[in-house]
Image (tube, rainbow, N blue to C red):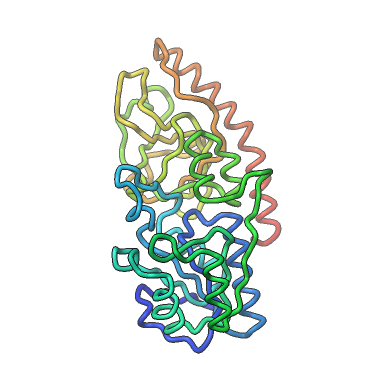
């Protein structure tokens, strides 16, 4: 079935539905749990499944403008991911001051009940909505009882003692714990990027690189350092290593994201848009006293990355054999 996408809730009128609401940035294991629950309940009740999300990210309107939330996922990727759960309807509400100042009750009655007639709401335990977060779980319980809506509160998933959340995953990525972040995400952290030509310096070092520019302007970027990466270029998986940093050996100050692919002529895909994901953080960025020292380190990095790459290729093999 094809998921329908609505940017205005007025344009949708359902007789009954099962819904969930959230920012859903960087759809992670906890979110899988909630969306799968929406699906299974809507199948049991033989009604429509609906995910409601917001754009831009609510915290970017409510919070301190200096501390914009960097996104784990662009809207385009979020849509693509929610589509893969076979949800019937995705409603993307424009998060503006009008919605921000709306009372929780008004939001539920005037928007949700009026247009979606929910029979069931599925919510994470810590979800809040409405003006000044007035719509928390205890509020939602009372509201649903009065309005004859069933409510399913999904317990948060934990990774050891830590609750899996977009905020926690952002912190892991910022601090360089990429494997832990990927585990909590349930997928590899990555983003769409446009390939722009670099300074051509990598070629001279025998390590031709392509410079990448994230497509989403508020994209969260990994901690500075060297990573094993996988790029999806025209549907094909290509491994490589990526340096994200300021290239201190050459006395430069601009942050650059440059990737060297292990088995590919880089000239072929300038101006393409590719998907790049970060698999392992190999080391910090270091300032070398000479170019020779840098090349020596790049050789070590490459052999390190190539040995790590095997376990990911095995994983791909498994996924392939299970008829992904």
Q: How many marks?
A: 0
Q: Residue shown at 35%/27% (left/top)?
A: 246
What is the quadrant of residue 270 in the picture?
Answer: top left
Residue located at (55% from left, 74% from top): 142
Point out residue 254 in the picture as x, y percentages from the top left corner: 30, 30
- Lateral position of residue 70 relative to residue 66, left or right: right
In-image side of 210 versus 276 (left or right): left
Looking at the image, the residue that sits furthest to the top is: 289
In the displayed structure, would residue 87 be above or below residue 189?
below
Q: Nearer the viewer, residue 85 or 160?
A: 160
Nearer to us in this view, 259 or 19 = 19
Q: Horizontal placement of 198 versus 298: left or right?
A: left
**Residue at image x 45%, y 49%?**
72
Q: In the rendered image of this protein, does residue 129 appear above or below residue 319?
A: below
Query: In the rendered image, which quarter contains the N terminus?
Result: bottom right
- How far across and down, in percent of the image, does residue 279 sit? 56, 40
Quarter holding the C terminus is bottom right
Which of 21 and 184 lies nearest the eye of the viewer? 21
Q: Position of residue 10 (x, y in %)?
A: 35, 81
As rendered, which of 3 and 206 lies closer to the eye? 3
> Which residue occupies the extreme bottom position in the image?
15
> Could you say where residue 35 lies in the image, as x and y percent from the top left?
58, 67
């Amino acid at each position: 079935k094809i998921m329908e996408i609505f940017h205005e809730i007025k344009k949708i009128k359902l007789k009954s539905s099962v819904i969930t609401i959230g920012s859903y940035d960087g759809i992670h294991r906890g979110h899988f749990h909630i969306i799968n629950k929406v699906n299974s309940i809507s199948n049991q009740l033989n009604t429509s499944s609906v995910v409601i999300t917001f754009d831009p990210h609510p915290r970017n309107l409510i919070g301190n403008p200096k501390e914009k939330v960097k996104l784990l996922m662009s809207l385009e990727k979020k849509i693509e991911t929610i589509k893969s759960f076979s949800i019937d309807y995705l409603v993307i509400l424009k998060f503006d001051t009008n919605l921000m100042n709306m009372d929780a009750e008004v939001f539920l009655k005037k928007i949700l009940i009026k247009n979606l007639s929910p029979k069931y709401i599925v919510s994470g335990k810590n979800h809040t909505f409405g003006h000044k977060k007035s719509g928390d779980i205890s509020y939602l319980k009372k509201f649903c009882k009065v309005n004859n809506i069933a409510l399913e509160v999904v317990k948060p998933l934990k990774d050891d003692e830590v609750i899996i959340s977009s905020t926690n995953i952002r912190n892991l990525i910022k601090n360089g714990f990429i494997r832990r972040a990927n585990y909590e995400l349930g997928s590899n952290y990555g983003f769409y990027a446009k390939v722009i030509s670099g300074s051509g310096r990598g070629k001279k070092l025998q390590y031709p690189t392509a410079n990448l520019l994230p497509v989403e302007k508020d994209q969260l970027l990994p901690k500075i350092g060297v990573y094993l990466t996988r790029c999806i270029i025209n549907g094909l998986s290509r491994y490589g290593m990526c340096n994200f940093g300021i290239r201190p050996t050459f006395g430069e100050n601009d942050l650059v994201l440059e990737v060297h692919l292990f088995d590919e002529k880089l000239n072929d895909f300038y101006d393409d848009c590719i998907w790049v994901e970060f698999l392992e953080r190999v080391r910090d960025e270091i300032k070398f006293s000479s170019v020779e020292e840098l090349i020596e380190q790049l050789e070590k990095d490459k052999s390190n990355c190539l040995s790590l790459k095997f376990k990911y290729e095995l994983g791909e093999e498994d996924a392939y054999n299970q008829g992904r």
